[in-house]
Amino acid sequence: MGQQQLLLIIIGMIVLAAAIAGGNLLFKVHSESSAKDNIISECSSLGSLAQQYYNKSAEMGGGDKSFIGWSISEHIDSTHSAIYSIILANDEKLILRGTPQKDKNYSWAVKTTVTKYDIFSEIME
């Protein structure tokens, strides 16, 4: 009888360890997915600000149908999620990059392309 109880305890501990390991893995996967969604959302918000600049006349402090001259405000160029930078700005489009903060240890970044009508984000591995 004692050996059966010991065997059941050992099997129970193995199942519990596997469940904890699986839960930890799911948490990490969900955390990374959430970080991607958050950075894409913040890049889209920046893209929206850039589109407002594009459509505003030069007299009103805008780009007058150009993304040239638009910059990311120093208050929002870095958040708890990522650091944002401009890769390209010309008359037709603007390309932004959202790089996750270094403490996250992620190997990807978000690239957002902004045009007159569209904002499109993609994950760069």
Image (cartoon, helix red, strand yellow):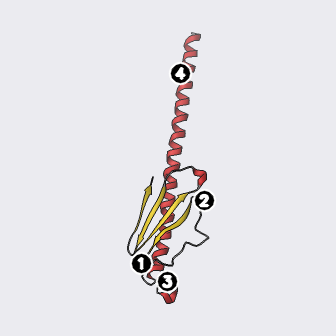
Mark 3 lies on a secondary structure that is loop
Q: Amino acid at mark 1?
A: Asp
Q: Which residue is mark 2?
A: 80
Determine the CA span between mark 2 and mark 4.
Answer: 42 Å
Q: Residue at x 56, y 49 (%)?
A: 105
Task: Please name which of the two marks, 2 or 1, marks the residue nearer to the observer.
Answer: 1
Mark 2 lies on a secondary structure that is loop
Q: Amino acid at mark 2?
A: His
Determine the CA span between mark 2 and mark 3.
Answer: 28 Å
Q: Residue at x 58, y 67 (%)?
A: 77
Q: Quadrant of the N terminus?
A: top right
Residue most extreme to the left: 117
For marks 4 and 1, the one nearer the N-term is 4
Query: Callout 2: 10 Å neighbours few (<14), some, many (20+)?
Result: few
Q: Quadrant of residue 102?
A: bottom right
Q: Residue at x 44, y 84 (%)?
A: 64
- Mark number for residue 11? 4
Q: Which residue is mark 3?
A: 62
Determine the CA span between mark 2 and mark 1.
Answer: 31 Å
